[in-house]
Amino acid sequence: MSTSEYRIFLLSLDKRSFFDEMYKPLLGALASKASVQRATKPAAAISYLSTNTPTAIIVTDPGIVKREHSAILEKVISYASHGGIVILAGHFSSFVRPDDLNEFFHSRWNVPWKFGEYQRTTLRLNPQARLANKAGLPAAYSQKAVFPSNVPLDAALYLPTEDSVTESLVFPPMPVADLKQTPVVFAPVGEGWLGYVGDVNAEVGSTAVVLAMCGL
């Protein structure tokens, strides 16, 4: 497929002023492989989602969690349930509140995931993950991230190992307590997929992950 045949929609209802600079590598990589459009206003988001079926929707911040944006969220969930790909990435994990995230997962997406650890560690690619497009992904990489719990093994794209320790410039390394928590999730929802990238520092590996989730 040519670049124009892949269409990525960035849903940025609570866009921070530094987002474009922080995620410049990701935005550039997406633009090199697909046609990219973005909505920062509710009316623009509703208009786009009412008339387009993109290759993937990347939710770049937790603005969609707000109750006043419930109509937009309903369209996003419908898009995924009918075969679309939705990825929660960028600033989403950095600024979403734990209770809001749990409610968002449970009540709106009907998945059992919960806000878990917030830590930096090195994770390895999970060969049992259901994401088909793993060829360009790093075998392992370090990231500081929000780790959801209660994620099925085949939905966890990266996992800590028995050798994984917390990585901090302040505190001594400690073994990672829960080896089942993951900051990189890709799970089926209806006929489509819901992805989550909890990395808060825009690691190079996470750029590759988002591209793979988009099928690029």
Image (spheres, rainbow, N blue to C red):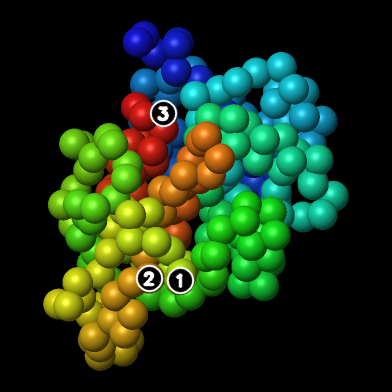
Q: Nearer the viewer, residue 92 or 201?
A: 92
Using a 10 Å C-alpha cutoff, classify the residue at mark 1 as few (fewer than 14 neighbours), some (14 to 19) or many (20 or more): some
Q: Nearer the viewer, residue 134 or 199?
A: 134
Q: Nearer the viewer, residue 193 or 136?
A: 193
* Camera sees residue 169: no
Q: Amino acid at mark 1?
A: Ser
Q: Earlier in the sequence, mark 1 or mark 3?
A: 3
The residue tagged 1 is 149
Q: Is residue 1 left or right of residue 72?
A: left
**Quick one: SS at disc 3?**
helix
Find residue 196 and report its horizontal and vertical position in percent: 47, 52
Q: Is residue 133 above or below residue 37?
A: below
Evaluate if marks 1 and 2 touch, with contact meaning CB atoms under 8 Å apart: yes
Q: Nearer the viewer, residue 151 or 199?
A: 151
Find residue 5 and report its horizontal and vertical position in percent: 45, 11
Q: Earlier in the sequence, mark 1 or mark 2?
A: 1
Q: Is residue 182 left or right of residue 58?
A: left
Find residue 187 and report its horizontal and vertical position in percent: 44, 48
Q: Is residue 93 above or below residue 188?
A: below
**Quick one: SS at disc 2?**
loop
Q: Is residue 176 left or right of residue 92?
A: left
Using a 10 Å C-alpha cutoff, classify the residue at mark 3 as few (fewer than 14 neighbours), some (14 to 19) or many (20 or more): many
Looking at the figure, which quarter contains the N terminus? top left
**Quick one: SS at disc 1?**
strand
Residue at position x 38%, y 38% from top?
Answer: 213
Looking at the figure, which quarter contains the C terminus? top left
Q: Earlier in the sequence, mark 2 or mark 3?
A: 3
